[in-house]
Amino acid sequence: MEARAAPQDRVQALNRPDRAAWLGFALAVIILFFVFNSRAYKGFFIDDDFDHIANARSVDLSYYGRALIKPSLGADATFRPAAHFYYFVMARTAGLNFRPYIAGIQILHLLNVLLVWMLVRALGAEALGAAAAALLFAVHMAVFKVHWEPMYIFDLACGTFTLLCLLSYVRGRVILSLICFWLALKAKEVAIMLPLVLLGYEWWFGGKRWRRLIPFFAISAALGVMALVFNVHRDTNSDYTLRFTPAALWKCARFYAGQLVLAPAGARYVGFAGFAILALPFFIRDRRVRFGVFSFVCLLGLMLFLPGRLFGAYLYVPLIGLAIAISAATRPVLLALFFAVWIPWNYNQLRVDRRAELAAADERRAWFQPVANFMSRHPETDTFIYDGAPDTLAHWGVKGILRNLRDNRPVTVTWVDASEVKVDLERPHVALLIWNPAFHTLRVVPRAPDVSYILLSPLAPRWQFGEGWIGEDQNFRWTEAHATARLLYPSSARKFEVVFWVRQIYLDSTHKGRLQIAFDHRPVGTAALDKADLNTFRFDVPPGMDHPVEVEFDVSPALKDPGGSSIYYGAAISAFGFVP
């Protein structure tokens, strides 16, 4: 006679197929996520990444410890230490190798998907509802950039600590929950609304033990008051200024409602479908739905008054609430129909975002790589004048690149039209960084000895230009009524040549003008400005001494700017210099 299996063994035998099924589901979610986001590894750092990496390399470990316990939401470069610590680790292990950064944030996101599963199960969701919550949170393309750009580590880490805070609280570990709340705040300020979410939990799920919430609300209130005081004294034109107005609220709410349903650009009314989530608690009488929608609104609350910073990625933490709401679903057919439409809809949006992201990444890489190559050969260069950059590479990103390539040694980075550029151009170790947006190429032009002839192209040696030069074109530059330049005056010189355009607009205003050339204040000759054409004039000059000379260009009369500014234009010069 065969021995009868013990009851415990029979239960385990019944559960094994279920466990295998859910492990298969987890594997399917991971595969689906990487199918959606595998090309993120072909991306590249954005401007904020370069800035954060440089900042992380400039501080030591103790800095994060001090910033973590500091009772404020400050405005330091690393004022979100719980998330910024990611850059501290990666900068020292991966340097400027992009792929490890992406691997790190994607692994963290998948960990958050697991935490969503655990949270909704702790709230009483059935396995099917928990699967729906995890799947929705895993591949919602409103937060596309969170999976593609390391700088959204702040939202990711805030999501991690928010989930841990909620999960710990639900399991009765209040002290651990309070610690996670503090870490969530130190990852991103949106967590300041988390006590309201805990309040909702006590109302719908807990025993209405309000006293447990006192330390959470005390911390939130104290830091919130400091943040509001800082906001009052912030520049009113700043994109980071909170604006508590109906107009700001409506603008933000309409934007995030559209992002929630992935409304196509230009689809004016489709985005309003996102507001339907607010009606769910009135039609589906389930406490998980009510708590989830309430949590979504609370966690989004701060962003509803920040109209200057509208990004779909900011839905990442609020989506925890939406995942809780959908975990109430129990009908397999309805869920299957929903995801049969929802996943392809997300993939369609992914294709649009992916194309733009990879194109922008290629541009940033095309700007970065020539500079990196140049710095490896010329580490002594410590001053950079940059003329243009990709649209997605702001000034702090340009400076962040150069700080990193200089290993955070002192570096001067100046925009070509900045007032201090003349001083910086005279430094001994200077290089021009000239971006061509049409061909997506960067030319690095290091300072070289003065030349005797200059073509007015973007690659012209700017350190030889003096005062009075206006704007720039591909093959000429305007002067003011008076302009100067420094040239090497070679012993082989016999003539001085000037090639310039006389514009019809100049003749229409002045009828006739005159260009006078002088060397070190000594007149050399004059040229008539009376023919609307490309003119070339040569003046006889004596041999030089192979020393620099200051060339002066004076135009009379000058042309008043037709646009109404106070500028007076002189000649549109294409080339000038000494010829044998």
Image (cartoon, rainbow, N blue to C red):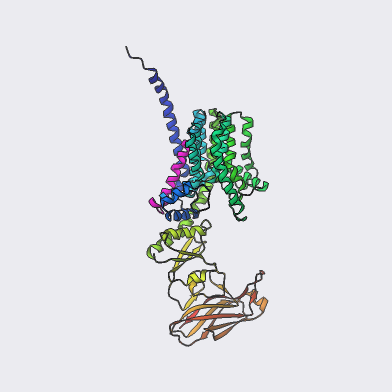
Where is residue 547 drawn, in percent x and y? Answer: 44, 82
Q: Nearer the viewer, residue 294 or 352?
A: 294
Where is residue 66 drawn, in percent x and y? Answer: 45, 49
Q: Quadrant of residue 491?
A: bottom left
Determine whether 279 is above or below 94 in the image. above
Magenta span: predominant SS is helix
Determine whether 55 is above or below 435 in the image. above
Where is residue 209 drawn, in percent x and y? Answer: 56, 31
Range of residues picked out in magenta = 90-116
Which residue is depicted at the point 43% across and 54% down? Answer: 59
- Quarter of the picture containing the C terminus is bottom left
Would residue 453 be visible to someone looking at this image?
yes
Q: Nearer the viewer, residue 264 or 171?
A: 171
Q: Nearer the viewer, residue 68 or 38?
A: 68
Q: Is residue 92 left or right of residue 578?
A: left
Which residue is depicted at the point 52% across and 80% down? Answer: 551
